[in-house]
Image (cartoon, rainbow, N blue to C red):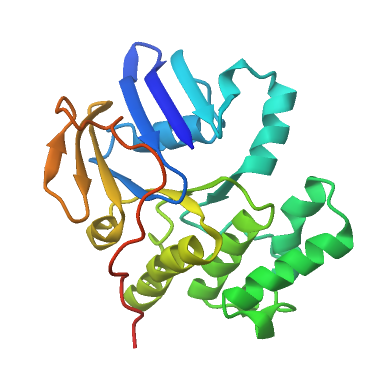
Amino acid sequence: MIEISNIHKSFGSLEVLGGIDLRIGRGEVVSIVGPSGAGKTTLLQIMGTLSRPDSGTLRIAGTDVLAMSDRRLTRFRGDHIGFVFQFHQLLPEFSALENVMIPALIARRSKAEAQRRATELLDFMGLADRCTHKPAELSGGEKQRVAVARALVNAPDVVLADEPSGSLDSHNKAELHQLFFDLRRQFGQTFVIVTHDEQLAATTDRTIHLADGLVVRETHRDDDAIDAGGSSGTSGFSGSPAAPTTEPSTPA
């Protein structure tokens, strides 16, 4: 699904990523953790084609995205990658349904198709009765679920999330975390999540630990940590993961 090889990125004299190698399989839910300044968000932006690395290769769904022109890359991003941010970034003048429809309309889907898909997703999110409400009329948890639906409306290959539960209370965090697994089970969705939330990271299939712009170790949910230089390494995943034997429980 995502293959990253020897990615370097500097800002001036500061090297933020010092040679990242990483593979993420279809249907995986992967978290990326590390201290501030480790390069987590920079890596996510490169994976999302929002930023180009100084060197290295990036393939998404078999496509060498770094070889694309900016115009082709913009179209590829809209069709294949969804984004969820810490703050929902919903447009206040539009309803929940309209906010979810916008990426589909930008991708030149018909209005009827965009509305059908958006309605289906909001129903799956438990928001069928909130479709006509504007963001100011929604709770924090509802806004973030609308943002997740918006990320999924074009059926992307992967959803990239940057601190998606960072602005939520504990109850809404738990619901959002469970939602990622529900979406994986229902749609086979791949998620890559940058987070400082240890509880969320502990529930994902794999946790990639960054420090000083490098992958220093990898933790599997049911296994011990693996050093980046170990035989299993960060590039050792191939194929679709087996379904987890347990999912995070839905809060009461």
- Is residue 93 visible to us here? no
Residue displayed at 59% across by 77% down: 138
Residue 244: where, in percent of width, then height?
31, 62
Residue displayed at 65% across by 69% down: 121
Q: Is residue 112 above or below residue 54?
A: below
Q: Is residue 37 above or below residue 102?
A: above
Q: How many labels sit on residues?
A: 0
Residue displayed at 55% across by 61% down: 187
Residue 97: where, in percent of width, then height?
73, 70
Q: Residue furthest left?
A: 224
Q: Nearer the viewer, residue 224 or 46?
A: 224
- Is residue 27 visible to us here? yes
Residue 118: where, in percent of width, then height?
72, 66
Q: Is residue 89 above or below residue 11?
A: below
Residue displayed at 60% across by 67% down: 146
Q: Nearer the viewer, residue 137 or 211?
A: 211
Q: Nearer the viewer, residue 200 or 248?
A: 248
Which corner quadrant holds the C terminus? Answer: bottom left
Left or right, 214 with reference to 40: left
> Which image quadrant for residue 143?
bottom right
Left or right, 32 with reference to 168: left
Left or right, 181 with reference to 61: left
